[in-house]
Amino acid sequence: MAKGGMMKKLSGVLFLCFLSLILCSCLAPTMSGIIHGPKTPEEKAWMDKVMSEPIEFEVDAQEEKVAWSRAQSWISEYSGVPVKIISDSVIETEVPQGGSTIGYKVIKTQKPGGSFMIKVSGVSSDILGAALIGMAKEAEINLHILAHYIKTGDLPYPYLIRTNVAPARPKK
């Protein structure tokens, strides 16, 4: 085979690989939403409630230790990203490389009256890339679920969390 023909074939194969990679990265968030999305009226009602709650909220002084413990356990169990910092005021994961997932940061500050403000946020090495492949919505859902869990301890549907380490939906 002539050198030009071989180069043309190789270019075609590389192009197909590149195209497949782009398609997979575009479909992955969509598939995650299908797999992890609410399916029952109860799940939908819970998700609507969770999404309407803020990701920055106040907890009473007597609830602070339990809430902070919940933040640590959720991030350790469900984030899918190694924890970088755990202190009395910050929990932060490593910054994931690439736009395929987000990391998490939870900050706790004490108010003058003794209560605490807790703020949940995401960290990413490529916010624009995450938005372009549809991860922004997935991240927003996870941030709201995390904030709700920290505040209330309520997590009846952990399989609605949009990470690769979330438990599978129970079989009926």
Image (cartoon, rainbow, N blue to C red):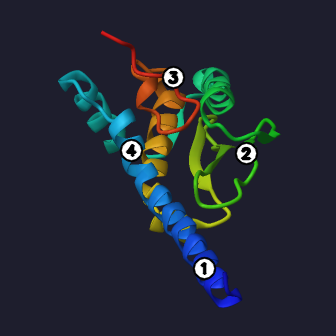
Mark 4 and mark 3: Cα distance apart in space: 16 Å
Mark 2 residue type: Glu
Mark 3 or 1: the one toward you: 1
Determine the image quadrant of residue 63. Answer: top right
Farthest residue to the left: give it: 41
State how far apart marks 4 and 1 are (Cα): 30 Å
Q: Position of residue 45 (x, y in %)?
A: 23, 29
Q: CA distance from mark 2 to mark 1?
A: 42 Å
Residue 31, percent from left and from top:
38, 44
Label 3: which residue? 167
Give left or right: position of 83 versus 110.
right
Residue at (66, 83) in percent of width and height: 7
Tags 4 and 1 in contact by the CB under 8 Å rule? Answer: no
Whether residue 53 is visible here, answered yes or no, is: no
Q: Residues within 10 Å of mark 3 (few under 14, many from 20)?
A: some
Nearest the viewer among 132 and 75 is: 132
Residue placed farthest to the top in the image?
A: 172
Read off the residue under disc 1: 11
In the rendered structure, are the residues bearing label 3 and label 1 in contact, judged by CB atoms less than 8 Å apart?
Answer: no
**Is residue 57 found left or right of 61 in the rendered image?**
left
**Which quadrant holds residue 110?**
top right
Label 1 Cα crowd, 10 Å radius (few <14 / some 14-19 / many 20+): few
* Residue at point 71%, 87% (across, down): 3
* Residue 92 badge: 2
Of residues 35 and 122, the one nearer the viewer is 35
Question: Looking at the picture, which amino acid does disc 3 mark?
Answer: Pro
Amino acid at pointer 4 = Met
Of mark 2 and mark 1, the one earlier in the sequence is: 1
Circle 3 SS class: loop
* Front label number (2 vs 1): 1
Q: Which residue is mark 4?
A: 31
